[in-house]
Amino acid sequence: MKSRLEQQKINFKNLGMRLFSAQKLVLSQSTPYEVIAQFKQTSVRFYPSENKRFKEPLVFVAPLAINMDIYDLYPYRSLVKHFQESGFDVYLIDWGKLTYKNYQINFLSFIDKFIPKCIHAIQQHSNSEHISLHGWSMAGIFVTLYTARHQPNAVKNLIVLGSPIDSYASGYIGKLYKKMAHLTARNAAVKDYVYNRLPNWMIHSPGFMNSLGFKLLDPKGWIDGNIQLFKNLDNMKLLQEDATLSHFLNNMIDYPGGVNQDMLLNVWLQNPLKQGAITLKDQTIELKKITCSLLVGAGKSDQMVTAASAKPLTELTSSQDVTFTLIPGGHLGLMSSQNSSIEFWPTLTTWLEQRSTQLQG
């Protein structure tokens, strides 16, 4: 049994490691992958399954701002590894490091250009016409609108998690946007400027602001996590997990101004998706055009995109096969928490298995 002095030395050493050598503790992105396509800063990662059982690959489309840590957070709790081991080839679309020079990129850039190009490369590489498409948060909006606009034969199964469809129903954030929309609508000149004339470069948000925004979503959780860390400095696993999660949160990427304009001013502020359609640059996209199998999920404790905000998608498409589920965790936790991996990942796996083509032998 260690003496009090020995324990203090270990704690002090571990604290120093956490503060000054944190990178050595980071566990994320340890699963090997191959880059099968590259388009400027965008890359398509391939995680092959050693025991492939299903023909259709699972394609993760990442949202903007985040780095790819969230899909492969820990060696023992990795979303891509889980589906690899479940018999699915996995592809991950990584948008790369967007910067201020990309401020004009908007929703249609992804829906009409980037996503179709990546999916075509995946179809060729996988030798499979059909795929299962997964989008979380903003990427859930991307894949929903892509599927609705193009009605691609490629998308056999669509998974949309933590994405705002009725933005005004999303708790305090939704009430704030509803009030802001009401105030904006009272003045025609202000409304015209905000929605039609506000320059994209003015609302481009750098990565450090996005990092701050994620932390402010759950300040209590962030504080409690640091308190637990200081109380358990002798726990190396906890030290590694804290460093890994901090690496994810502290290395966010820019939101281009054009994307902010579509997401903040259109989706959140005007709330058009609640009615089943959205107009982007005079192009109207109707959600009723979606006919593939659809799974919609929301975090049980998500304060950014509540269940009431995400669930309306289940009633706005023409799909005859629709599932809604609540997932343990908040906006980030629904993707990566231990409870989500225990309760939701197996549920999603079963859902996919039942809707995928099983390989013979």
Image (tube, helix red, strand yellow):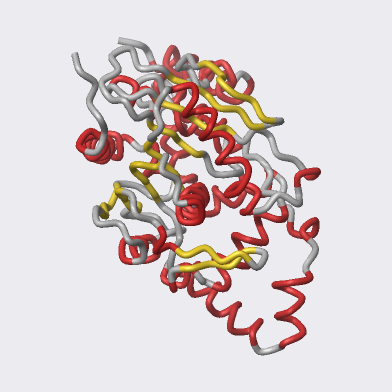
Residue 7 shown left or right of residue 190 in the figure: left
Q: Residue at x 33, y 49 (%)?
A: 292
Q: Residue 184 at what x, y percent from top left?
A: 66, 81
Q: Nearer the viewer, residue 64 or 59?
A: 59
- Residue 139 can be seen, yes or no: yes
For the C terminus, the image quarter is top left
Residue 68 shown left or right of residue 82 in the figure: right
Q: Residue at x 60, y 48 (%)?
A: 112
| Above or below: residue 329 compared with residue 235 | below
- Residue 297 can be seen, yes or no: no
Image quadrant where residue 74 sits:
top left
Q: Residue at x 70, y 56 (%)?
A: 258
Q: Residue 24 at what x, y percent from top left?
A: 56, 16
Q: Residue at x 59, y 52 (%)?
A: 213
| Above or below: residue 159 compared with residue 264 | above
Residue 41 shown left or right of residue 270 in the figure: right
Q: Residue 193 at what x, y percent from top left?
A: 77, 76
Q: Please tell me how many numbered marks the rendered image carries.
A: 0
| Above or below: residue 221 compared with residue 125 | below
Q: Nearer the viewer, residue 276 or 63?
A: 276
Q: Nearer the viewer, residue 354 or 256?
A: 354
Q: Residue 227 at what x, y percent from top left?
A: 45, 39
For the N terminus, the image quarter is top left
